[in-house]
Image: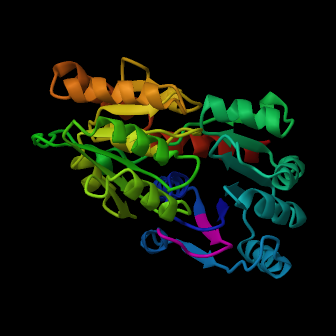
Amino acid sequence: MKIAYIVPALDAGGAERFILDLIKNLDRDSFIPTLILFSHGGFFLEEAQSLGIEIIVLKKNFLFDPINFVKLCWAVRKINPDIVHTQLGGDFYGRLAAKILGVSVIVSTEQNVQRDESWLMKNLKRWTASFANMIIAISEAVKIDVVKRYHLPENKVTLIHNGLEIEKFLVLNKKTMSDRVIIGSVGRLTKQKNYQLLIEALAQLKDYNWECRLAGEGELRLELEQRIKELKLTDRVKLLGLKRDVKGFLSDLDLFVLPSLWEGLGIVLLEAGLAGLPVLASRVDGICEVVKDGQTGILFNSGDKMDLVLKLKNILDNITQPGIKALGKSLQASIQERFDIRDITRQYEDLYLNLLKK
């Protein structure tokens, strides 16, 4: 069975990482995947090319580019897929193209709670959602948001968590801690990730011996650099840009912090957990489905700087104690059990087959 996966690009991000891992783990005796990138190539393109699948890269010049859409339709027509699977910005373009061309099965994966989605995009996605046979939500929080936002019946939205390659990120023997506590995070430098809150909280803990490393790029980089200078933290907070070796980056940390304002699930939380790191994260959305406060990590009230300062202070005071280390081990075991990409891929394959039978 032929599946056309339609996404804008393979930029550095958890959703893009997931779609690659899903394709990589498909049963090739049953499914032939083709990947259509209708905007541009992106950070993971070279890795995608190593999978030995057909990849079609188009160029999108405008928000609504009719020439680009015609090229997308031609690409889908050439593939003649049994299934079109969209995600991210591919939902509107991909579902519309698949509907026009009469593709048998259309599915979409919703990767986030859409707090910053425009009115226009929300209504376009609501309209094209009617073309889909099924929409997959990556967490219960995303499922609730999708049903409400796009006015969908609950039986049209199913829950399948994102997963990742366990062996790729698993760290069983942590490095010996130095006197300086290395705090870090991975993610786009955007409003959603709320790294300014973390930087401002750390500014109140200058008496502690710590260093903060942030891996990622985004539109707020200059703003964050300026704030780091204002708080006189240039020697302690490092913006490191994109990192291909995420496992290596995480292995050098002693504490992982994710201060997001909203989060569908957080692939990076799964990666940090597999690295055996204690995790401090905001109490929002899908994060609460991964991290159980006091059991597999520590949660703070989203956007609450003083709560974040207090939680950071408590962790820094006890970073070498068995209780903090045990949180990382518990999260690691939970992720190994619940988020293996091989199990997640089987769920997708079963869904594809059931939809085709119908």
Q: Position of residue 214 (x, y in %)?
A: 37, 53
Q: Position of residue 11 (x, y in %)?
A: 53, 65
In the picture, the quarter occupied by the N terminus is bottom right
Question: Is residue 344 toward the left or the right of residue 229 in the image?
Answer: right
Picture layout, residue 93 above or below residue 332:
below
Q: Quadrant of residue 89?
A: bottom right
Q: Position of residue 337 (x, y in %)?
A: 38, 30
Judge whether residue 125 is colored magenta.
no
Q: Is residue 349 visible?
A: yes
| Image: magenta residue range | 33-43
Picture layout, residue 161 above or below residue 289:
below
Q: Quadrant of residue 342?
A: top left
Task: Identify the residue at image location x=85%, y=50%.
Answer: 119
Task: Identify the residue at image location x=64%, y=30%.
Answer: 141
Task: Identify the residue at image location x=58%, y=58%.
Answer: 31
Question: Is residue 12 toward the left or the right of residue 91 in the image?
Answer: left
Foreground residue among 168 and 264: 264
Foreground residue among 269 and 253: 253
Q: Position of residue 318 (x, y in %)?
A: 20, 23
Q: Quadrant of residue 292?
A: top left
Picture layout, residue 122 above or below residue 145:
below
